[in-house]
Amino acid sequence: MHGLSLLRLGWRRPLRCPPVAPSCARPRVSLQWASSLTDRKRRAEETGIETLTAKWQPHWDNLAPQWHSLRLSDKGNAYVLPMFPYPSGTLHLGHLRVYTISDVLARFKHMQGYKVLHPIGWDAFGLPAENAAIERGVHPEKWTLQNIEAMKAQIKEMGGRWDWDSELRTCDPAFYKHTQSIFLMLHERGLAYQAESLVNYDPVDKTVLANEQVDANGCSWRSGAKVEKKMLKQWFLKIKAFQEPLLKDLDTLAEDGRWPEKVLAMQRNWIGRSEGSQLSFDVKSNDTSFRFNPIEVFTTRADTLFGVQYLALSLSHPIVQRLAVNNDALRAFLERAKDMPQDTKEGFLLSDISAENPIAEITDASDSSIPIYVAPYVLDEYGSGAVMGVPGHDTRDHAFWRKNAGDSLIKVVIFPTQNSTLAAMEPGHEDKPYTERGFVAADIATFGNLTSKQAMRKVVAAVRSTGKDAKMTSTWRLRDWLISRQRYWGAPIPIIHCGACGPVPVPRDQLPVELPSLPDSFFKDRTGNPLVEDESWKKTTCPKCGSVAERETDTMDTFMDSSWYFFRFLDSENEKELVDPKKAKDGLPVDLYIGGVEHAILHLLYARFISKFLATTQVWPEGKRFLGEPFKRLITQGMVHGETFTDPETGRFLRPDEVDASNPTQPKIIKTGVTAQVSYEKMSKSKYNGVDPGTTIAKYGADATRAHMLFQAPVGDVLDWDEKKIAGVQRWLHRVVRLSRAVWLPDEKLDDFKITTKIDSQLGDILEDLSGRRILRPYQPFVEKMIESLSDDDAKLWIKTQQTITSVVESYSRTYSMNTIVSDLMILTNSIWDTPNSSAITPYLKWYSTMHLIRMVAPIAPGVGEEGWHSLMNLAAPASKQSDLSTVFASGFPTADLAILDQLTHKHKCVVQIDGKRRFQVTIPKLPKTISPNDTEAVSKFILDELIQTEEGGKWLDKQTGMIWKKSLTGQPHPVYKIVPDDWNVIAVKEGALCNFVSPKTKRSSNV
């Protein structure tokens, strides 16, 4: 490529005529422009990255009322929502990470031309506030509102842009009025009910927990206390009525990676549909005065029925409860079992009863009697609270049997190969169950050598033929949602209990049922539910009969609030409806929902349930189009871990002030001189590894903190927070600011430097404008020749700019690879910086490239973006400062000039035909200047050599597998074009833009 020399092109002053008003007209807020390169460099050096957010915040605040109109185009609505925070009082880095991600994406969508809703609110009800009230002797509302104000101030420091006019608090009666309304809608449809149930009770927080709020060790998710089992009357929502669509529609959310597979897997597992069989086991009792109904068992492996060696019943199974009346040992075991972990292998043998294997009379088995145990691992909710134990083919059953039956032989009835015979497993190194599917033992009558799949259906049919109950069925792990909480700080359940009428819904016109106003002193050191003791609030009249009645004193699970809050953001001031259906139609589903994977089961499952329900009502009838799914795309960010120092000798966590970290690779414990162990772990007070986002922002600035957070790790990965690396991000952002100060523009060119085309102009338009202003001399045809004559340096810069735009837009729009965005922008920054001023065009291309860079940086580092925008625009057209574009965020997001890339990279499109019919199109290099377009043989050879290297070309031209060779009658290579057969012809025209292969058949036809 021949570069444009200064002698040929010249650096000419533009004509002394009024400048064309650029469409990228000037911002109202201007910067004083330095007249010399020295001054520009000095001022760039003096620009403090850490101060830019605070500098521009007043300007953004002034623009807030007109923000949604500051768009170059109207692409419709977009809803970007981070999971709203619990107002604990202090933001942590996890908050900062999720809000940075959402803010970046919201700003990007805004710059693309969308009217973006990016709201913030507060998940303000909950146990922590009430516990704090008890500890401090202050009303939970007062504590909550103080925390909200503190966190709002912290959020504003991070440089985010929020729709504060949509702000909501779930503890506001104006909000929970509609939470209560949703409860009543569910109640009217029979989807809310009250029932006696054995529930999980937290003895520390003194409230009931849903199954989802109890961990694998049987402890409360909130307090960590060992959960107790209590029989209480509670309110439930029938989420099971929606279990089919909740499971099925996960497939839709999986399309195009809309939801992370990890979250989908967790929800599938929690909903837990299992296909299997229901079998009935008769029960025999040593006491003839006792008669028991058959035990119903669900199993996914009916093929292992021949190997059943015990049945296990849940703690509350009717048979267990009946026998416990007269069995002291059993009652004692049941009491102990309450404190056992859920996966315990402890069991209690019910020696007075046994079960009969329903398949025994078909197989003539002699040992049909089966012992029955009580086992804490059996859940009441699974099947009918009973499972069959097959130690030979289930790991858990095997462990339970060895624990409770010792060295007893274990039956093996399924084998990996056919023609295997029944076997017995003894204790030892081979004592492991075979858990895969396989073949039934050959010596089991009627079923021998059947595959597991065949045996499952045949077993069910055979048992049914004997008159016993048996059927193919499915079971679900999902249980109805327990929403009752015995605490004050939650939305009251809108039910009134009447002695004559029973539970009666509160009339809609009496909503909200507000919490009573209680003095601060009421909460000090109090236990239990204050609502039970507040007689003035509790006593009321029945809406149905007018009799004296009592309000329901339970409040709703706070997940009820978060199951629908995203509806309310669309219409937060509506006093009559929870949302105007038209606004729901225009605004839902949420386009981007960002939050932690820890909410995969609880919040996200409940939100899907309530949204699907509301899609069946007049609240969101349009929701049927989206299967009632509330969130189109889900982004789950990883946790933020902090640097943790540990004493290697004692294992004690060390405070940072106990460690000399001047040598980061060898941090020393100050007191002992021993090298401390360094790791990155979940931040906590006990590990002394917490980081205050406010301190970090004050030290490094919001822009550098945000960019560092995005750059350090992919969004979905754990982020190891290492402030030592933030300096590199600071240097990069400072270099961006220096570029915006045009440190690449010599002093002698400053007076004449003007930009008079759109900032998103394509290269041809830019060059044509420069030619028209006599900065460059015109060529004929102008655009093609000018582009062809670009210097290598200019071409590389423009290529890199367009490639970066393409990559960044892809990352912002589809992959959400924020770390690669920062990396790509760093590379582009260096490319602009390193490109020499090799032609008259270079400064102009640098201006456009820098402008694109700044607009791509702006969502990540708003202060740097705004500073750079105003700086560059003042340089470009200082006579047009009073324009309407007052912020970089009104300038639009760069769009790649893709059409120019092939020209700049010396490639073009080649259409390939077979017998005149188009087959495919590929991009190949243009003809080198050493080949004349009139030399048809040389052109054809060059085109063929390039085509064979492409994937599509290889499919046709490869000598072993190519379709052209398969259609050859001779199979011999062409004497000139070796990679095609000699009975084919090649015609290349338009300098290689079209290549036609002529087959032997066509050639013969033309010769006739």
Image (cartoon, rainbow, N blue to C red):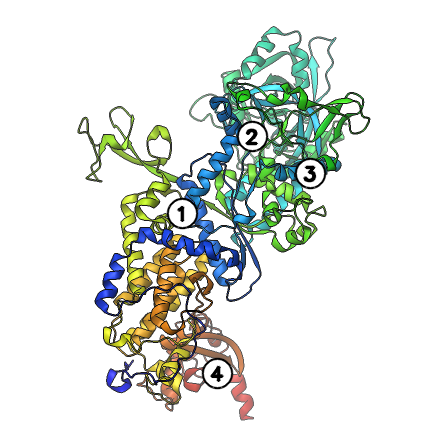
Task: Give the residue at mark 3.
Answer: 181
Q: Residue 445 in the image: x percent, y percent?
A: 65, 30
- Mark 1 → mark 2, Cα distance in angstroms: 70 Å
Closer-to-camera residue (395/303): 395
303 relative position to 825: left or right: right
Q: Residue 363 in the image: x percent, y percent?
A: 67, 26
Sequence-wise, the earlier of marks 3 and 1 is 1
Task: Give the residue at mark 4.
Answer: 996
- Mark 1 → mark 4, Cα distance in angstroms: 60 Å
Mark 4 residue crowding within 10 angstroms, few (<14) / some (14–19) / many (20+): many
Task: Give the residue at mark 1.
Answer: 158
522 relative position to 88: left or right: right
Secondary element at tag 4: strand
Residue type at mark 3: give it. Ser
**Going 62% across and 13% down the picture, which residue do you hit?**
350
Mark 2 residue crowding within 10 angstroms, few (<14) / some (14–19) / many (20+): some
Task: Give the residue at mark 2.
Answer: 421
CB under 8 Å between callouts 1 and 2?
A: no
Q: Which quadrant: the N terminus?
A: bottom left
776 relative position to 257: left or right: left
Residue type at mark 2: give it. Thr
Sequence-wise, the earlier of marks 3 and 4 is 3
Q: Looking at the image, can residue 238 be seen?
A: yes
Q: Residue furthest left?
A: 673
Which circle, 2 or 3, is nearer the viewer? Answer: 3
Which circle, 1 or 4, is nearer the viewer? Answer: 1
